[in-house]
Image (cartoon, rainbow, N blue to C red):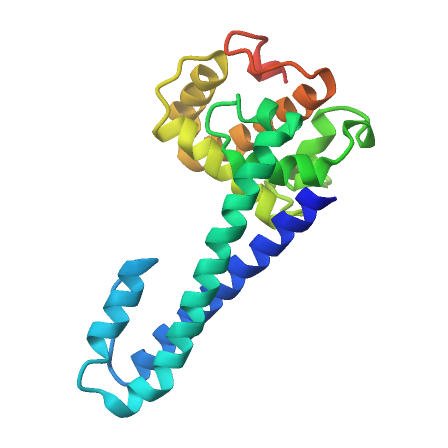
Amino acid sequence: MLIRTLVTARRQLLKMRLQMSNQIRGLMKTFGLIVPKGAGSVFERNVGTLLEGEDKLARIVLPMLQAWGHIRLRVAELSKQLVAMAGEDQRCRLLTSVPGVGTVTATAFAAAVEDPANFRNSRAVGAWVGLTPRRFQSGEVDHDGHISRRGDHKLRSLLHEAAAVILNRSTETSRLRTWALALKERLGFKRAAVALARKLAVIMHAMLKTGELFDPQAGNPAAA
């Protein structure tokens, strides 16, 4: 329950931080001041530079920028707590053995699933997260559509990010990555990333059930 509360609180602050930065960008754009791309201290520095010589506008925007900065600090504090709590949780340590899965994804998944017994089997987790293709059947028409996008949006995004890491940045050799790269070559990055994200949800649930670390050479991913 503490992990779930921490994940939820951090997620809410991240959302507030994004909304605040977008509002600042929108206000400044009204006056012809376009804030360049960048996050964190880069965003803060860019806003400050653009406000030089704009005293009246600065009196409006700077309080918002200061509020954004306070939220950023609170996010950093909760992130540290998340890392510390994940280090003490056996489930989170287990899940971070999966390539591409970091502390945030592991804690979010463990908190969302709670008890692996809540699902009849590991494959059901993919549908629960919203990563299972919708099926269209009407007369002679029978095909798969886009993913359902049901369930926890943030968890789905985190799993997709983990899949992107495996496909684009990971150098670790595993049957899972080999399968995913072959899928990318055949279907393209987007579809391969969704399929891999769904596979990760299935694997991670199975790991929570068995208590075993990720095995790079285990099983046939295509059959999972």
Q: Nearer the viewer, residue 111 or 1?
A: 1
Q: Nearer the viewer, residue 39 or 193?
A: 39
Residue 120 visible (yes or no): yes
Q: Residue at the bottom extreme?
A: 56
Q: Nearer the viewer, residue 117 or 213?
A: 213
Which residue does the image show at 59% across and 15% down from the upper left? 213
Which residue does the image show at 35% across and 73% down from the upper left? 25
Is residue 20 found left or right of 11 in the rendered image? left
Residue 204 to residue 130: above or below: above
Q: Quadrant of residue 67?
A: bottom left
Residue 80 to residue 176: above or below: below
Q: Nearer the viewer, residue 201 or 143?
A: 201
| Percent position of residue 180, x then y | 46, 22
Q: Residue at the left extreme?
A: 53
| Percent position of residue 223, x then y | 62, 14
Which residue does the image show at 54% across and 60% down from the upper left? 13
| Percent position of residue 172, x then y | 39, 17
Which residue does the image show at 69% across and 23% down from the upper left? 208
